[in-house]
Image: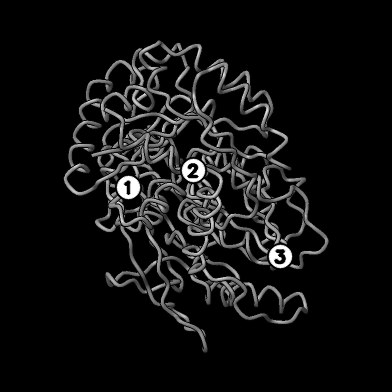
């Protein structure tokens, strides 16, 4: 199996987006291409068709490659539960929870074997592997036991393209510094450089391109423009937050406040609101910042009880409770749904690590949540318990959670598995659900927004933007990257690498 690895001079230089573009470019050439990231650290996960869990970036890249996502595309997923501890998901299944120190000392050999097994499986079905690195390959204090950059390039035996973000400044130093810190055997593997996020006339950088090539001996494959408003999900919460301003824009009619939880997960639930022309999202982490939004959304979390503690300690919990009691609209998703209840009971310590821990919820909905030792991960759909005339009442989504919840009010959905999901109170003013991607259902999202618009005395609107447009976004991204890169040199690099 041929391949290429995209590494970066730092985190958030655009590796995921470039891998997504390359996957679509190669797929359009008729190649059977697979994405791969050996180890991803993210609470933003993707549920595969067989109910397994991988990093969301690799799920998106699989969509761009026009193939079905599998656990072999991201065999190790680390989901932080605190600043010190992460849950390890191996081949899509919860494996164990370790500190960073214990992970390096206890999991390394298992990790190497896991990576080799995953690549061997992918080689059975794919021609080309597009591999994404993590952070920087020049983390000298970690490189003796790393599982994400040059060690993976060595195992897969692929050339490396180094990506540098010119928008953050210091692009020459970051490229030269990274290459200088690499051992010679690893440095020889770097066969190309991409300058990313360039603003303005690329011709002004021609002398910079020449200097880099002369100084490093590595070809600059292209200078990619700063691409705004790409309708493709970001990998982390920072990239999501950067899409929104911190104060409510005056030209936006609908003001949505998202509670900015310390351990937020699957924040891509908010993605569709980026493209609604009258909707503004702002992230709120203090009582003073809450104000009087048109609706509050409490997103998912990797640690429900710890994040509930955060709400109480910051006094945001009181602000939220008062807001809802005063007639405000609220939606809780997954962990946010659990927080709406009266009690959260962690008898086994699966959420907190403390056996027998019980905490009072926000008391907004009559429900109790019990944390279990087995995680539920499934792609699913349900039918609205309270149908809405004129729209599809089928809601598609996915579930990733440890808890099970019981309640004494109307459910939000009847699931295809024959279960009840969520709560629906006061004609939908209060909604809780385990369904991630609920707002990705275009007609339902629009109906929910229309109720807010009507409450404000604004006119109802038809569906403004459809999630089906994401396919167009993959092609638009691929077109822009393909036109900016020296594709002849790119293909030659892959084919001739031994």
Task: Tell me which residue sits at (32%, 27%) in the image.
Answer: 152
Task: Tell me which residue sits at (61%, 62%) in the image.
Answer: 273
Q: Nearer the viewer, residue 147 or 203?
A: 203
Quadrant assignment, res 298: bottom right
Residue 294 marker = 3
Number of residues whose C-alpha sits closer than 10 Å to that of mark 3, classed few (under 14), some (14–19) or many (20 or more): some
Residue 18 marker = 2
* 10 over 478 or under it: above or below: above
Instruction: List x then y, in percent, for residue 256.
Output: 68, 60
Q: Which residue is denoted by mark 1 in the rendering?
A: 53
Residue furthest right in the image:
250
* 390 over 164 or under it: above or below: below
Number of residues whose C-alpha sits closer than 10 Å to that of mark 1, classed few (under 14), some (14–19) or many (20 or more): many
For marks 2 and 3 on the same chain, the one whose residue lies earlier in the sequence: 2
Instruction: List x then y, in percent, for residue 396.
Output: 40, 69
* 322 over 311 or under it: above or below: below
Q: Quadrant of the N terminus?
A: top left
Instruction: List x then y, in percent, for residue 160.
Output: 40, 29
For marks 1 and 3 on the same chain, the one whose residue lies earlier in the sequence: 1
Side of 357 where 51 appears, left or right: left
Q: Is residue 373 visible?
A: no
Task: Tell me which residue sits at (22%, 43%) in the image.
Answer: 122
Number of residues whose C-alpha sits closer than 10 Å to that of mark 2, classed few (under 14), some (14–19) or many (20 or more): many
- Distance from disc 1 to disc 3, alpha carbons, whole Å, reads 33 Å
Q: How many numbered callouts?
A: 3
Name the front one of labels 2 and 1: 2
Q: For the residue labelled by badge 1, is the local secondary structure a helix, a strand or a loop?
A: strand
- Mark 2 and mark 3 residues within 8 Å of each other at the beta carbon: no
* 40 over 407 or under it: above or below: above
- Distance from disc 2 to disc 1, alpha carbons, whole Å, reads 23 Å
């Amino acid at each position: 199996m041929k391949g290429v690895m995209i590494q970066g001079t730092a985190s958030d230089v655009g590796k995921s987006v470039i891998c997504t573009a390359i996957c679509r470019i190669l797929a359009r050439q008729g190649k059977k291409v697979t994405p791969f990231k050996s180890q991803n650290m993210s609470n933003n996960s993707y549920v595969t068709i067989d109910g397994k869990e991988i990093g969301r970036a690799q799920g998106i890249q699989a969509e761009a490659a026009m193939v079905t996502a599998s656990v072999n595309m991201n065999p190790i997923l680390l989901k932080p539960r605190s600043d010190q501890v992460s849950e390890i998901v191996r081949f899509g299944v919860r494996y164990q929870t370790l500190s960073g120190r214990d992970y390096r000392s206890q999991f390394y050999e298992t990790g190497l074997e896991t990576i080799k097994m995953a690549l061997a499986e992918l080689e059975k079905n794919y021609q080309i592997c597009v591999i994404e690195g993590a952070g920087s390959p020049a983390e000298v204090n970690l490189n003796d036991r790393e599982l994400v950059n040059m060690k993976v390039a060595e195992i897969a035996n692929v050339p490396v393209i180094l990506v540098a973000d010119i928008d953050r400044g210091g692009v020459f130093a970051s490229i030269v510094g990274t290459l200088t810190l690499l051992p010679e055997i690893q440095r020889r593997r770097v066969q190309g450089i991409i300058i990313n996020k360039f603003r303005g006339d690329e011709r002004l950088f021609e002398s910079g391109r020449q200097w880099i090539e002369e100084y490093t001996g590595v070809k600059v494959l292209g200078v990619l423009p700063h691409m705004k408003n790409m309708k493709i999900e970001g990998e982390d919460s920072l990239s999501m937050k950067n899409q929104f301003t911190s104060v409510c824009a005056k030209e936006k009619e609908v003001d949505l406040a998202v509670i900015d939880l310390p351990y937020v997960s699957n924040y891509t639930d908010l993605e569709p609101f980026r493209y609604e022309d009258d909707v503004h999202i702002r992230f709120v982490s203090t009582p003073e910042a809450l104000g009087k939004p048109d609706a509050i959304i409490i997103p998912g979390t990797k640690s429900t009880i710890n994040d509930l503690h955060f709400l109480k300690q910051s006094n945001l919990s009181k602000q939220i409770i008062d807001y809802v009691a005063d007639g405000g609209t609220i939606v809780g998703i997954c962990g946010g749904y659990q927080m709406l209840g009266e009690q959260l009971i962690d008898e086994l310590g699966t959420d907190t690590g403390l056996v027998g821990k019980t905490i009072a919820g926000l008391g907004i909905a009559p429900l109790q949540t019990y944390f279990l030792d087995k995680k539920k991960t499934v792609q699913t759909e349900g039918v609205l318990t309270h149908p809405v005339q004129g729209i599809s009442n089928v809601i598609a989504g996915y579930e990733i959670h440890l808890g099970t919840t019981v309640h004494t009010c109307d459910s939000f959905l009847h699931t295809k598995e024959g279960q009840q999901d969520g709560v629906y109170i006061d004609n939908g003013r209060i909604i809780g659900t385990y369904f991630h991607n609920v707002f990705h259902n275009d007609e339902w999202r629009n109906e929910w927004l229309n109720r807010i618009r009507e409450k404000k005395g604004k006119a109802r609107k038809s569906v403004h933007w459809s999630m089906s447009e994401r396919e167009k976004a993959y092609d638009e991204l691929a077109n822009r990257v393909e036109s900016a890169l020296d594709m002849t040199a790119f293909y030659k690099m892959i084919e001739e690498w031994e």
